[in-house]
Every structure is written in C-alpha cells, then in structure tokens.
Amino acid sequence: MQNGESQRKDGKYEFKYVDVNGTRRSAYSWKLVATDKVPEGKRCELSLREMEKQIRRDLEDGISTHTANSITLNELFDTYMSTKELKQSTRTNYMYMYKNYVSDVIGKRRIVSIKYSDIKKFYNSLILEKKFKPNSMEIINTILHPVFTMALRDGYIRINPTDGVMAEIRKSHNWEKPKRHALTVAQQERFIDYVANSETYKHWLTLFTVFLGTGCRVGEIIGLTW
C-alpha cells in the first residue's frame, strides 16, 4: 500500500487526502490497480490508483476534485444567476431559455463530465430538432459560456467546454456574416452621379451625400435637422 491508501473490511480500497480547501476527503474503489478484478455484483469504473493520479493532478492545478465531481450544471447556473446583475427582461429571458432548453437536457450532468463534443452535440440538436436560428443559439451560448467560465475560475474545471463551439457552429451552418467592403472614391462618385440624375431618387441626394461624407449611422442621420 502507498501513502494514504488502505483497505476496508469489506474489501473496498480507500485513499485519504486533503483537498485544495484544506478539507479531509476520501476516494473509494473496488480495484487497487486497473488490472484487478471487480468483486461479483459490484460496479467500478476507475481503480484507486487511477483516482489518486487524477486527484494529485487536480491538487497541483488547484482543482477542487470533490466539489467538481458532485456539482451539476443546474446548480452552477443557479449560483451564476444569483451573482449576476441583469435587467429584469434579460434575466427573465435567460431563465426561460435555460429552463426550457438546457435544464432537462444537460443541466443535470456533473460539470466535469461535460466536454466540448457534448456542447457541440447539444447545440446541433437545438438547431436540427428545435429549429433554432442564429439569434436563439447566441442566447444559449451567452448563458452557458460565462457559467463555465465561473467554474473554471472557481477551480472546478480546467477548460471551458463552450470555447470555440459557436464559431464552429456558425461556419458549419453558413451563419458567418459576409465581410463588408467600403465603396471606393470612384464608386461613391458614380453612385452620387446616378442619384443626382434619377427622377426616382434625386430627392435623397442630400441625405446620401451626408451619409458618405460623415459615415454616420441611419439613426444619427435621420435625427438631424436643418
């Protein structure tokens, strides 16, 4: 047996350690090493030594293993929302979207079990099954990304599984916004010349001239007076 290891009377192995918060914890397994056989009728995923390796890595990285292995996405969302200052309309919208599309699908899962591929699969399911459009998907991502960022900063996970997912979703579904190109001086001159000589549009000549000369937005231009 190595440091911190012991075997109970029922045959189960135990590893005792102190977590990043100074709290005494224990990890249990029916197998000491990966090649051990699991007693009949018992279930076991990882051996104790495999658990120890993960725990020691977590301790070095400041990850709270025990909390991370027990907290769910739903619990984390509730914590995030309780600390976030939002307009009431925005809060209501976030709560509605989360409750109806996230909570029962992946919300009950432990945060450490949610990977990049899980998020991508979830997003695609919203698009294909729920017929989500770009704006709705952006809302879901705007909700989930900061929740996982909080988990990252609190030492529950190493990476944010939502990082980069929306960029890939936009690309795969052709949601990329076309790049805008400014008119050249020659093109502007031709445009103004056309407007000035058009019976249909010439009364807008002053407006278009101000647009081109200032670069102002529509709302700013229409608010101007003589």
Image: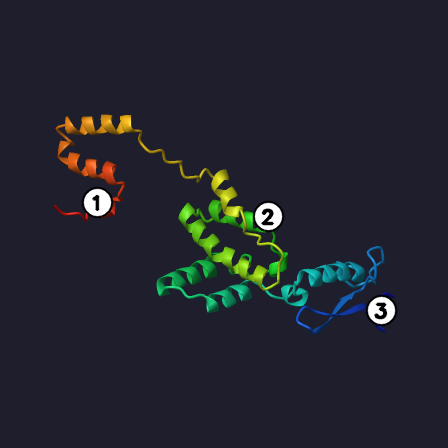
Element at badge 2? helix
- Mark 2 or mark 1: which is in front? 1
Asked whether residue 104 is in view, the answer is no
How packed mark 1 is, by other alpha carbons closer than 10 Å (few <14, some 14-19, many 20 or more), is some
- Mark 1 or mark 3: which is in front? 1
Residue that label 1 marks: 221
Q: Quadrant of the C terminus?
A: top left
Q: Position of residue 58 (x, y in %)?
A: 69, 61
Q: Residue at x 19, y 46 (%)?
A: 222
Q: Residue at x 41, y 39 (%)?
A: 177
Residue that label 2 marks: 117
Upstream in the sequence, badge 1 or badge 3? 3
Q: CA distance from mark 1 to mark 3?
A: 79 Å
How packed mark 2 is, by other alpha carbons closer than 10 Å (few <14, some 14-19, many 20 or more), is few
Q: Residue at x 50, y 46 (%)?
A: 166
Disc 1 residue type (three-letter) = Ile
**Between residues 9 and 214, which one lies in front from this camera angle?**
214
Disc 2 residue type (three-letter) = Ser
Q: Residue at x 18, y 38 (%)?
A: 207
Where residue 108 sits, quadrant-wise, is bottom right
Residue that label 3 marks: 11
Element at badge 3? loop
Disc 3 residue type (three-letter) = Gly
Q: CA distance from mark 3 to mark 2?
A: 37 Å
Upstream in the sequence, badge 3 or badge 2? 3
Upstream in the sequence, badge 2 or badge 1? 2
